[in-house]
């Protein structure tokens, strides 16, 4: 991922893929023009890198020149009126091929056609390395297209965002979700996860997604996913991961302007962790860290027995049940600890101390992400 000015971009098209596309265009055009000596005209600034690579690959003699779009000066207009400058050569009867880096709305192309109407060229063809069919609003023929791309803003290989990015040898795509902090929060029963999640949520403006709560909400409100989950539960079967993921996805979608999420109670297995990665990827984001509160077993048992005196929770009252829950927790999280450690995303945080001390330790980890 890279940052240009205020925005984040992710890798989209590699140098090798660009190279293949350019070579394909060269082959097609060289094949069509046989022994004619064409004039290649690049539209500056964006096309400089494409034109350079293109003509280096072109197997036969050719001429190369550039034109540039410039805004009219001294004309007041709400419209962005532009004209082409730099066309000084006599092109009468010549085979002209426009080399464009990208065709988006087609406005530039319209201008190109307007200019060339009076040039008496023998033939005018349009070649563009990138083309956004969903954005194109004109009906000028595009004779050669390198790669069709979705209607999302790209940079690199000559293309810029506010002046930056032209120098990159590969193409990056604008991230639709800008930078988020997504945490997977773990802690054995009694570690104070709920308490700490509340603080993190407020400090970092995160949305706390507790899988248990999401389940209960969907079932209570009889959503389609809730009913589906319930149908498995009623049969005594495990709810398939995909159903849970779909519920979480809906939660993420509902909070699309969030600065990030705290996942609590999910994932529990490798398969779920992979599914969560995919979900985050589809939102143009990622899990940044698994944070696990670490508390010695004896301290946990003490805390839970203490809580059991007032909470009325049966599972907090019996020491052997408590120990079982703790053992169960470590069995399950060990797998995930490996999963996230392998990506350098596991952070164990000492969960013994006062609430504010623990909060400070958590903040220190998150601030460094
Ligand atoms: P048009 O909308 O087809 O006229 O495209 C006009 C110009 O907008 C292109 O020559 C580029 O300079 C710029 N442009 C369009 N889409 C992108 C993009 O995704 N990244 C960077 N520049 C773009
Ligand atoms: Mg351009």
Image (cartoon, rainbow, N blue to C red):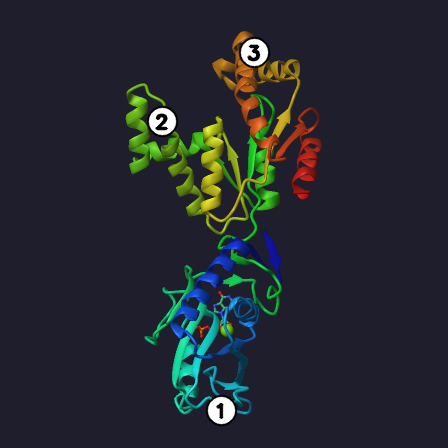
Frontmost residue, 223 versus 339: 339
Across and down, in percent, residue 126 comes to 41, 75
Total labels drawn? 3
Query: Of callouts 3 and 1, which one flags the residue occurring earlier in the amino acid sequence?
Result: 1
Up the image or down, 277 lies above or below 104; here it is: above
Q: Which residue is denoted by mark 3 in the rendering?
A: 323
Q: Quadrant of the C terminus?
A: top right
Q: CA distance from mark 1 to mark 2?
A: 72 Å
Q: CA distance from mark 2 to mark 3?
A: 26 Å
Query: Of callouts 2 and 3, which one flags the residue occurring earlier in the amino acid sequence?
Result: 2
Q: CA distance from mark 3 to mark 1?
A: 88 Å
**Left or right placement of residue 95 versus residue 233 in this view:** right
Q: Name the quadrant containing residue 106.
A: bottom left
Residue at the (58%, 43%) spot, across then down: 202
Query: Of callouts 1 and 2, which one flags the residue occurring earlier in the amino acid sequence?
Result: 1
Residue 30 seen in the current view: yes
The answer to the question of whether label 1 and label 2 lie on touching residues, with beta carbons closer than 8 A, is: no
Q: Which residue is denoted by mark 1 in the rendering?
A: 90
Label 2 CB-ligand 1 distance < 8 A: no
Across and down, in percent, residue 241 comes to 39, 30
Estimate how packed mark 2 is, as few (under 14), some (14 to 19) or many (20 or more) residues with alpha carbons within 10 Å.
some
Residue at the (36%, 26%) spot, across then down: 239
Camera-side mark, 1 or 2: 1
Across and down, in percent, residue 296 comes to 66, 18
Q: Secondary structure at mark 3?
A: helix
Q: Which residue is denoted by mark 2 in the rendering?
A: 239
Across and down, in percent, residue 87 comes to 52, 87
**Left or right placement of residue 280 versus residue 347 in this view:** left
Frontmost residue, 331 versus 202: 331
Residue at the (55%, 44%) spot, across then down: 206
């Amino acid at each position: 991922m890279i940052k240009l000015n205020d925005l984040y971009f992710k890798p989209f098209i590699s140098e090798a893929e660009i190279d293949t596309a350019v070579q394909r265009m060269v082959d097609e055009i060289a094949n069509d023009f046989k022994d004619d000596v064409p004039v290649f005209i690049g539209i500056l600034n964006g096309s400089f890198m494409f034109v350079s690579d293109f003509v280096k690959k072109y197997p036969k003699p050719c001429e190369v020149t550039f034109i540039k779009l410039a805004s009219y000066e001294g004309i007041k207009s709400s419209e962005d009126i532009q004209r082409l400058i730099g066309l000084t050569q006599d092109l009468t009867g010549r085979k002209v091929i426009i080399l464009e880096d990208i065709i988006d709305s087609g406005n530039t192309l319209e201008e190109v056609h307007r200019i060339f109407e009076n040039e008496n060229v023998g033939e005018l063809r349009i070649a563009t390395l990138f083309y956004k069919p969903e954005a194109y609003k004109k009906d000028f023929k595009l004779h050669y297209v390198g790669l069709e791309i979705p209607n999302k803003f790209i940079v690199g290989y000559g293309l810029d965002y506010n002046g930056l990015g032209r120098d990159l040898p590969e193409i990056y795509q604008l991230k639709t979700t800008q930078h988020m902090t997504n945490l997977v929060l773990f802690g054995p029963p009694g570690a104070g996860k709920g308490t700490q999640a509340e603080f993190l949520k407020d400090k970092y403006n995160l949305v706390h997604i507790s899988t248990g709560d999401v389940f209960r909400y969907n079932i209570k409100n009889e959503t389609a996913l809730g009913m589906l989950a319930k149908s498995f539960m009623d049969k005594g079967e495990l709810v398939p991961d995909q159903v849970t993921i779909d519920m979480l996805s809906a939660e993420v979608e509902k909070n699309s302007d969030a600065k990030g999420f705290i996942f609590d109670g999910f994932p529990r297995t490798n398969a779920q962790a992979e599914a969560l990665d995919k979900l985050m990827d589809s939102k143009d984001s990622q899990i940044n860290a698994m944070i696990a509160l670490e508390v010695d077993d004896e301290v946990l048992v003490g805390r839970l027995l203490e809580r059991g005196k007032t909470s009325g929770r049966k599972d907090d009252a019996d020491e052997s049940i408590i120990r079982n829950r703790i053992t169960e927790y470590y069995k399950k999280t060990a797998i995930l600890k490996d999963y996230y450690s392998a990506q350098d995303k596991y952070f164990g945080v000492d969960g013994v101390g006062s609430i504010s001390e623990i909060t400070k330790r958590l903040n220190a980890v998150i601030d460094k992400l």
